Amino acid sequence: MTIKKTVENVVQAKEAVEKLVADGYAHDDIYIFAHDEKRGEDITEGLDTEKVGITEEGVLNKLKNLFSSRGDELRSQMQGAGLTESEADTAEAELDEGKLVIIAKK
């Protein structure tokens, strides 16, 4: 089961992660996305959540993303984390507004 939440800031992200953990998701099942790569990495590290890697995304998509725009890369990663293509498109638009997207997948 995949759950997607959109939050405005890190405080809300922390609360959302804590609720997901209380609902039975492991920190390794939770992904946080931000449009700014450094911000996303800092939040992921600070809240001890997972990064989308080759396991989720696949080798070919990972290589393709080396040459893609940030938006394309994020959509691909969010699909790897469990969203459909249209859900990833919507989520990427939310990231463009400065929001954070949290995806939890068991």
Image (cartoon, rainbow, N blue to C red):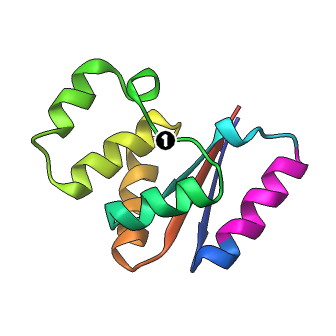
Q: Which residue range is magenta in the image?
A: 13-23
Residue in front for this viewpoint, 40 or 42: 42
Secondary structure that dominates the magenta span:
helix
Q: Residue drawn 45% across and 21% down? A: 55
Q: Position of residue 71 (x, y in %)?
A: 25, 57
Q: Residue drawn 71% across and 42% down? A: 27
Is residue 15 covered in magenta?
Answer: yes
Q: Quadrant of residue 57?
A: top left
Q: Residue drawn 81% across and 59% down? A: 18
Left or right of 22, for residue 5: left
Give the quarter of the figure containing the N terminus.
top right
Q: Position of residue 106 (x, y in %)?
A: 71, 31
| Residue hosting label 1 | 51
Q: Residue drawn 88% across and 47% down? A: 23
Left or right of 69, for residue 49: right
* Mark 1 element type: loop
Q: Type of residue at label 1?
A: Lys
Left or right of 18, for residue 84: left
Q: Position of residue 84 (x, y in %)?
A: 46, 41
Is residue 89 covered in magenta?
Answer: no
Q: Position of residue 24 (x, y in %)?
A: 87, 40
Residue in front for this viewpoint, 72 or 66: 66
Furthest-left residue in view?
Answer: 67
The count of marks equals: 1
Category of crowding for the residue at label 1, using alpha-carbon neighbours closer than 10 angstroms: few (below 14), some (14–19), many (at least 20): some
